[in-house]
Image (cartoon, grey):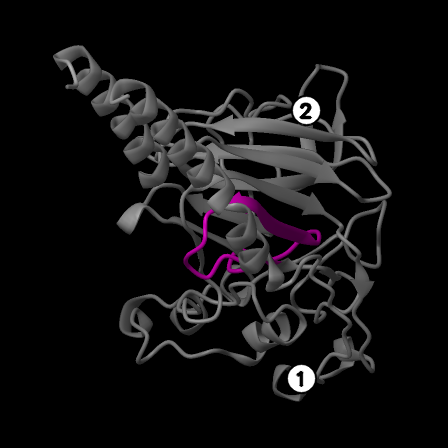
Amino acid sequence: MATTAAYRALAKILVILAVSVSGAWSKSFNITNNCGYTVWPGVLSGAGSAPLESTGFQLAPGQSQTLSAPAGWSGKLWGRTLCSTDSTGKFTCVTGDCGSGRQDCAGGNAAPPATLAEFTLDGSGGMDFYDVSLVDGYNLPVLVAPQGAAPGGNCAPTGCEVDLNGACPADLRVTSAAAPAGVACKSACEAFGSAQYCCSGEYGNPSTCKPSAYSQFFKNACPRAYSYAYDDATSTFTCAGGDTTYTISFCPSTTSVKSSSPNSQAPGDLPLINRTMTYTGGDQAGAATAARAPSRLVVLLGAILLVLAGVFS
């Protein structure tokens, strides 16, 4: 007959199993620079979230860095470009600058325009929510690809893989002396500040704030990315529990956007964009994690059976 100690041992194993299955998993961000130039990632934690171990650093072409994420973390990550340090030691970037004067952002937000990767981990229903947003404009291609997540949710790569700077409409384009052809592309809200484009005031709800010709420029090029404030239906992605790594790639398999003289056309006449978009893994990500997920459960169940065999023999 089983002893009290044996029952306690069995209970402990069942607790371990329950925790493993219910979502006590590790999460991390692997940030990779595939661009042909240096990128300085910036990180901002949301209100109530602990900061990650770094809030800003440098990645040369081909380099990557992994940051661990605490449970329940929310925040955003982005890339800064054309950064330099002046004679006084002040660090600034032409795009995505966070205003800290240093490589680490130290709580500073990205100055628009900037392509943003946004996360809420362990949110409603224990799901991770993530998106790539062009609501604050665009400065470089970004792809977010989850790896290792358990089955469940709309868990797939998302982002904006194409280079929009050259095709950006003239009234949204940001240039610099180093890159007169364009270094970033503003949102219509930032460029014009009107309630219609900013989804504010009388336009502050989904029924009155509709996609504009400008936001359609972003949406045509990057169908999975947020193009304006109420673009939730096609641009929010979710992953269930798992030892999930979110790979954030700058310039992933970048394809330039081609258009017929977009800068000479009125917003309503913006052409459809010829684009080739390849998401590594595509929608197979969920299937791949589903195939891997049972292995942990099988191991744990095997351990329980072995203990039971010893306890009740």
The residue located at (78%, 57%) in the rendering is: 182
Residue 165 drawn in magenta: no
Residue 147 drawn in magenta: yes
Residue 262 visible within the image: yes
Q: Dividing the image into 4 quarters, which one contains the C terminus?
A: top left
Please tell me which residue lies in front, 81 or 181.
81
Q: Secondary structure at mark 1?
A: loop
- Residue 165 picture quarter: bottom right
Residue identified by numbered label 2: 91
Kindly identify the amino acid type of the residue bearing the numbered disc 2.
Answer: Phe
Q: Main secondary structure of the magenta part?
A: loop
Residue 289, x across and y down, in percent = 54, 51
Q: Is residue 288 left or right of residue 304?
A: right
Please tell me which residue lies in front, 54 or 308.
308
Residue 114 visible within the image: no
167 up-or-down from 254: above or below = below
Q: Dividing the image into 4 quarters, which one contains the N terminus?
A: top left
- Residue extending farthest bottom: 269
Q: Which mark is residue 266?
A: 1
- Residue extending farthest top: 5
Q: Is residue 262 left or right of residue 45?
A: right
If you read the primary sequence from the N terminus, does the residue marked by circle 2 or circle 1 appear first? 2
Q: Which residues are magenta?
A: 134-158
- Residue 32 picture quarter: top right
